[in-house]
Image (spheres, rainbow, N blue to C red):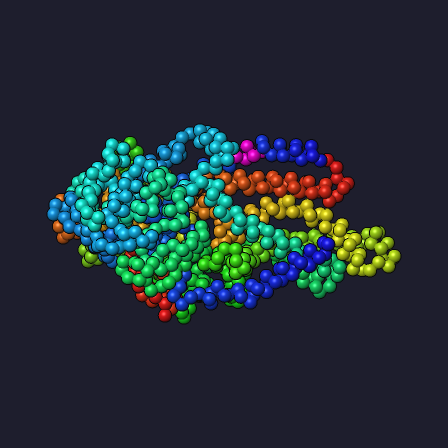
Amino acid sequence: MLAYTLRRILAIIPLLILISIVVFTLAKLMPGDPFGGEIDPNNTNPEYIEEMREKLGYNDPIHVQYMRWITSFAQGDFGKSTTYKKPVSEVIAERIPNTLFLAITSLIITYILAFSMGMYAGRKPYTIGDHAIATFNYAGIAIPQYIIAIVAIYFVAFKLGWLPSSGSYTPGLEEGTWDYWQSRMQHVLLPAVTLGVFSTASYTQFLRNDIIQNSRKDYVRTAKAKGTKESAIYNKHILRNSIIPLVTFLGFDLAALIGGAIITETIFTYPGIGMLFVSSIDTRDYAVVMSLTMLLSLLTLLGNLVADLLYGVVDPRIRY
Amino acid sequence: MKRSLTVLLSMMLLMSLFLAACSGSSAIKEKGKDTITYAVDQAPEGLFIPGFAGSAIDSQVNDFIHDDLIKVNEKMEYQPHIAKWESDDNITYTFTIEKGIKWHNGEELTMEDWQFALEVIADPDYDGPRYNYVENIKGADEYRKGKADSISGFEIVDPYTAKVTFKEKKVNNLENLWTRPMPKKALEGLAVAELSSSKEVQETPVGLGPFKVKKITPGEYVLLERFDDYWQGKPKLAEVTIKVIDPSLSVGSLENGEVDIMEIRPDDVEQLESVPHIDVKEQEGLGYSYIGFRFGHWDKDKRKAVDDYEKYQDKRLRQAMFYALDREALINAYLAGKATPVDSPIPSVHWIRADDSELTPYHYDKKKAEQLLDQAGYKDMDGDGFREDPGGNKFEIKFGHYAGPSAFEGRAQAIIQNWKDVGLNAKLATGQLVEFNTYNEMKDNDDKELEVFFGAWVVGSDPDPSGLWASTAEWNFGRWVNEESDQLLKEALSDKAFDRDYRKDKYVKWQQLFNDELPALPLWENMDLYGMNQRLHGVVIDATGLRDFHQWYVK
């Protein structure tokens, strides 16, 4: 297993290099650069713009620019954001905690909801409760995330006033205090639920079907015949088997959540890396766009790796 | 074990939901009596010392924190503010400021702070976009090239008096002078190259304005508090929160009181007007929309426009195309009625704007459009319903428009339909709306597809339109070359132009020329729209935006 893990990690390196070439080329092929676009004609003159392009090397041949970028990138220097006038690593580091907090909260909510609903529906299939859950799930799978987000904002935030519609905390609160964390919790809840709806729905259905299938297996019948309590059968025997495939989703989920946060964060004006990504593309802030794409690619690759390794952990039959 | 963990997690979730539900709206209700929230729909870039900031949002934030030595009034005329000035020869100006004006850190404002600002901007390592506001001062170039230790045209007489000498006598020198001092004591220890990324600029800016920064959360909030020693008197509000929200949330946030004031889009007006506690404020702004024509290309080496494209040379064709546009209907349908049709490319708030009686009004007139086209020889010869050009060849107008909010698609199609109604076969260039950056690049490179194109400008307080319409202007995207126009624009900046009537007269003549030649069709002036909670009072809005922040109060 160790050899396998190492082999997989090594295989990531050439992949990342290939991705970097694609990402860089695509970024540079995008029309416009940070100095085009809506310019106030009285504030910025064409000479200044040309001078800046020259200074930042945007007029060099593309392979020269690539080599310059990748060499410093490999050395941990992600460049300087043209928009925020700071090192990209700082800009991203500022936003990552918010995104992680959102992703983890979303994951927790997803798992709790999926487990409770999936277990219920699996134990009592074809009842009204099961149908209700199924309706909810199909809606969650079918409706696009941005629509759910807007509807949630409209009802929960504007009509009912239960939760805030935007931001990550109420300004003016002292960081680290109880009020601060409570405010952060309130702010993250709505985006987190929205972000998790799709996976909640698919997990629930998955778990439900797996439980139903398992409950017809021989070992369950044996347990029943021996007089084991119903709850013990479901909670111990069946759940343990049904959990296995779900656990492996965790790996894929990490990358998916962070990627999915792009839409959610933008709508909720939640300042994480998703919102940063969208605004950087708008302003053609190359250094930020490229670093974030590399980061997301790396996360996806690592997520896959984690998923593959988890297979082996939860199912001893799988050997590498 | 596993079970207890699940139970614990569920408890946590339930508890947080409960907490959220019972105190969720506390953020709104607990807001202090003299605290307000001002919303912007894009994150600031975070450069909170003017001189480094380039984006509109940063400038809006900076208006709360900083103040200017001189200011423009509602007609865009320059007025003394912190500083007064005098000049005998219009080349050397003597500025004086009052004693005892305080920076947020308690230091007194002196002319050294202004000198510092100018020298930072003229420094070779400076990475902001404002050097053109310093370059007209004598000696700025030498300083920038490292040949001088100071800018020779800036001379400090005493801490409260300074003399500025310009390179040449130009009537808009003052408009193009940098008059925002920087807090020298707070910044002087830092290398110029590092200033823009420093904490002193991004997190703890020191200003002269009515509010000082309390806390900045990048991408999310700028929290400001009252500056008691503000030179125009203690501001009435205790705190201002500048908050970033997505444009889709603006109506809801104003409605439920989360936001007290923000700039809004025309699409939101109707909905907001029905909210009882919200006022919609309209203000003629500095922005206008136009339709440009392609006359040639930009010669990059000689830095001037060359007119070598014949298709739209006949001004009767352009006039006919203008008459064919039902601008009132377009404004009502796609801008919620919040724009004013204009026939000049100078914003009405500028003092040089020609009176409407001096210009030909191009009201919607289908007959006149058809007559003009007939006269010019654009007639339907093959009976397909569309006019051919005077040579009898098929004539097709390619109209380009950039992508954006959903109203753009309809607006572009409506314009095309207007032209089709008078027999001009118009169609959308490239077949669809073009992504904004691509569109700008196409304009920059004189792309052949963009023969007729939609555009918009927001101009500054300097009324001189040379930067957009002179034949040597890079942003003259139609590449319009007209000697008379260049001549008039030059005369309006000449020595004689120090006489305001003379200057205005030249600009009026220029506008009349533009109005007749129509190198572009000035369509309408956009209205700046603000949604404002009625609890907020004392807000003054003019074409430059919000002002007099120290007078704002809550009732």
Residue A9 lies, in percent from the top left, at 63, 34
Where's the C terminus of chain A, which quadrant? top right
State the residue at coordinates (22%, 54%): B99
Considering depth in this image, is B189 or B304 the residue closer to the camera? B189
Residue B53 lies, in percent from the top left, at 35, 47
Residue B388 lies, in percent from the top left, at 33, 44
Rendering quarter of residue A205 = bottom right
Can residue B76 be seen at all in this image of the molecule?
no
- Range drawn in magenta: A15-22
Q: Is residue B194 magenta?
A: no
Asked if B16 appears above or below A43 in the picture, the reply is below
> Number of callouts in the render?
0
Which residue ends up furthest to the right in the rendered image? A226
Taking the image as shown, residue A4 lies to the left or right of residue B396, namely: right
State the residue at coordinates (38%, 68%): B535
Taking the image as shown, residue A217 lies to the left or right of residue B234, namely: right
Q: Main secondary structure of the magenta part?
A: helix
State the residue at coordinates (67%, 58%): B8
Asked if B133 appears above or below B215 in the picture, the reply is above
Considering depth in this image, is B220 or B398 the residue closer to the camera? B220
